[in-house]
Image (spheres, rainbow, N blue to C red):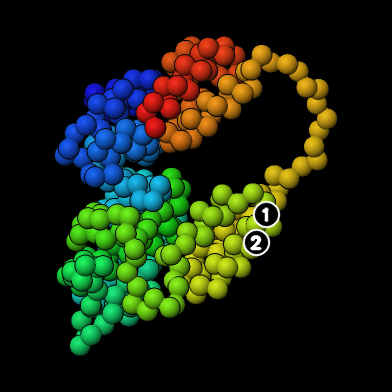
């Protein structure tokens, strides 16, 4: 199935494609025999405009959250027409982005070994980084500090400058707790995150922004914002959390009286379909995919059609 076919394929075809591909033992571990994860990555790839193989090798599902290598994140930035510049060594790294639509401003982020140590990613002993996994093996921070510093600088500056091109791929696998190699690819996940001083929590232990999106009310978001503010290293994302809170507050409206009409189980069938789509990671495209597969929108489909698609998605999950 070529990249062009995948971009235009109906959802049932993609589900079958994901089921077959999941049997390949050459895939990263989180995709082997997990067709739902494969389908999730392919859907992300379609959104990002990359091929299925690029999505499967560049997108990693860690603890149920999508993440991407710094290489893929940098590629998305450049694909969108923005300039990305990176330089560094074993002590520090600087990443800069100049947006195509704002060439007079330069976004810049610097990561140093001291900052990595403060975040609990490593310790500094005799002027060198020291970081071990739970089996007391050297991690990438100890073996490849220059690559890791550059990766952190790239992903942070991309979040600051190009949120619009990431489509939810905010973090690298390492930022979500996985041990990675020098290319930023996970070697073990999920794992217990390495911490230099376990008694002091750091921002990587919680994804406050994700919690804000999942919060039910603006008041819940406000509480999450306050907790995030307590983490000094989470300062860059406070405004994004605040924006989520403002949107949730704006969504609150007076209830409108409505007549309850019997629908012969259609409402339950639609709800079941949307729940299955969410579990399969295709909620964002289910409307279009359903229409392509059955020739009618979800709102006009029969209970039988809705149930059939629901069972198909449930089988892939």
Residue drawn where x is 34% and y is 38% of the image: 37
Are the two marked residues, 1 and 2, in contact with CB atoms closer than 8 angstroms? yes
Q: Tell me, for residue 218, which label it has, or none.
A: 1
Q: Please state if 153 lies on the left or on the right of 278 as rendered.
A: left
- Residue 207 place in picture, x, y as percent: 47, 59
Q: Quadrant of the N terminus?
A: top left
Is 198 positioned to the left or the right of 252 in the image? left
Q: Position of residue 135 (x, y in %)?
A: 21, 67
State whether residue 135 is above or below residue 161: below
For the point 48% across and 11% down, which residue is it?
295
Within-10-Å neighbours for mark 2: few <14, some 14–19, many 20+: some
Q: Which quarter of the picture shows residue 130?
A: bottom left
Q: Which mark is residue 136?
A: none
Q: Secondary structure at mark 1?
A: helix
Q: Which residue is mark 2?
A: 222
Q: CA distance from mark 1 to mark 2?
A: 6 Å
């Amino acid at each position: 199935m070529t990249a062009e076919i995948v971009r235009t394929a109906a959802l049932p075809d993609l589900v079958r494609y994901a089921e077959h591909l999941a049997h390949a033992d050459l895939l990263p571990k989180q995709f082997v025999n997990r067709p739902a994860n494969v389908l999730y990555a392919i859907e992300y790839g379609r959104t990002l405009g990359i091929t299925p193989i690029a999505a499967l090798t560049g997108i990693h599902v860690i603890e149920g959250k999508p993440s991407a290598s710094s290489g893929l994140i940098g590629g998305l930035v450049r694909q969108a027409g923005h300039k990305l510049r990176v330089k560094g060594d074993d002590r520090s790294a600087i990443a800069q982005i100049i947006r195509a639509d704002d060439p007079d401003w330069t976004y810049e982020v610097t990561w140093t070994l001291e900052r990595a140590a403060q975040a609990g990613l490593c310790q500094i002993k005799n002027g060198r980084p020291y970081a071990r996994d739970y089996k007391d093996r050297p991690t990438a921070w100890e073996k490849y500090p220059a690559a890791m510093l550059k990766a952190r600088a790239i992903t942070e500056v991309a979040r600051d400058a190009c949120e619009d091109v990431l489509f939810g791929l905010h973090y690298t696998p390492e930022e979500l707790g996985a041990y990675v190699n020098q290319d930023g690819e996970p070697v073990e996940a999920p794992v217990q995150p390495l911490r230099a001083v376990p008694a002091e929590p750091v921002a990587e232990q919680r994804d406050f922004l994700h919690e804000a999106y999942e919060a039910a009310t603006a008041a819940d978001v406000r509480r999450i914002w306050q907790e995030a503010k307590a983490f000094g290293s989470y300062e860059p994302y406070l405004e994004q959390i605040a924006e989520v809170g403002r949107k949730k507050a704006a969504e609150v409206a007076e209830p409108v009286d409505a007549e309850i009409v019997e629908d012969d189980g259609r409402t339950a069938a639609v709800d079941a379909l949307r729940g299955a789509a969410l579990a399969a990671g295709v909620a964002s495209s289910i409307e279009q995919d359903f229409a392509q597969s059955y020739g009618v929108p979800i709102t006009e489909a029969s209970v039988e059609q809705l149930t059939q698609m629901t069972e198909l998605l449930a089988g892939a999950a």
